[in-house]
Amino acid sequence: MTEATISATFDVYRHDPTGPAPARYQRYTLDLTPHTPLLTALLRIRAEIDPSLALKYSCRSAICGSCAMQVNSKSRLACQTQIGPEIAQHGRIVVEPMKNQPVVRDLVVDQHPFWQNYDRMQPHLILDPRRPMPVGRENPMTPDQVDRFRETPRCIACAACYSACPAVEADPAFPGPMALAKLYRFVVDPRDTATQDRLVRIQPEGLWLCLRCHLCTEACPKDVRPSERIRDLKELAIEAQGATEFGSKHAVGFKESIRDRGLLDEMLLVRKTYGVTGMMGQLGQGIKIYRKKPELLRKPHPIPGQEEVDRIYEALDRPGSDGGSP
């Protein structure tokens, strides 16, 4: 029995930066079955309607990551996205190139910034030359050691997380979710001999620019959960070196304030983050806050049930817990 088709409308981003024409959206309409992958639809558009459409693809099996693009404002793999649910939810499919990377043409982007940030993390084992890897045989690891990698070996480097990341958009110093998830993978590898150096270097190199929005985890087609690995990396960096950046000082101050009183002490948090000298630079903002909400600058009283807060912190600080060091 032949499956029923639907009329699918595609608004596809078209632009050639080398030419004079401005960027535009070109509309195409096809009759397709609802389970048709978007990549198949785009290839049919190129084969039957417009051979000038530029896009990247390879495996068509969600393995190579080449066909990542923006689909109705979400970073996705075109080969993994069926048109039916998109049409049902949005009425059309808007297809755009990935964000945070320069457009080469149409749906093709220049991924040089993405790979440059990846290379900065030295995503390979760094070994002590005095203790080389065994030759001709495996270097076994225990199941617990492998479990510390979490989901990071699943990454296919599609850059969907990089495209979805507002921190990358706001600050080019941020390495990006994938690069930091890869860094975590080698930090916890027991065979690597540069763990301390990696953790010391990453604090001032953008680790704390992460906004904790979890959009990277939402975009990841392989459930790598890069935002969770960035969280783990932050905890490991503080353990290795202490709080050295405004971001890490803010995190430690926040944690200590809630632990002590169950409520956030705003004045203490500013002092923990910027220090007494740095607080002077925040004086103008502090006066504005005091005028609007003076209660924010008062020292909070301990809340009822503080013992429950203590138990939560004890559980989170327990090694191996989801909220503590892995």
Image: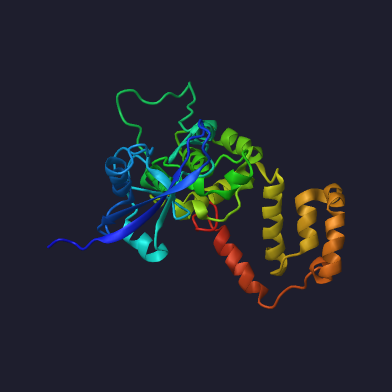
Which residue is the extreme one toward the left? 1
> Viewed as shown, does residue 303 lie left or right of 202?
right
* Left/right of residue 258 with respect to residue 128 in the rendered view: right
Q: Residue at x 51, y 49 (%)?
A: 164
Using residue 269 as the reference point, say whether residue 171 is left or right of it: left
Residue 326, visible in the rendered structure: no
Could you tell me which quadrant the N terminus lies in?
Answer: bottom left
Of the pair 121 and 136, the residue shown nearer to us:
121
Q: Residue at x 27, y 58 (%)?
A: 35
Q: Residue furthest bottom?
A: 304
Please state the horizontal and vertical placement of residue 138, each as a whole percent of the image.
32, 31
Depth order, front residue of 10/136: 10
Report which quarter residue 9 is drawn in.
Answer: bottom left
Q: Position of residue 97 (x, y in %)?
A: 46, 44
Q: What is the x, y in percent for residue 101?
A: 52, 39
Q: Is residue 64 above or below residue 82?
A: above
Residue 4 visible in the current orientation = yes
Residue that sits furthest to the front in the current view: 21
Q: Residue at x 33, y 51 (%)?
A: 38
At a point 49% along the width and 55% down the height, the residue shown is 320
Q: Nearer the viewer, residue 292 or 273?
A: 292
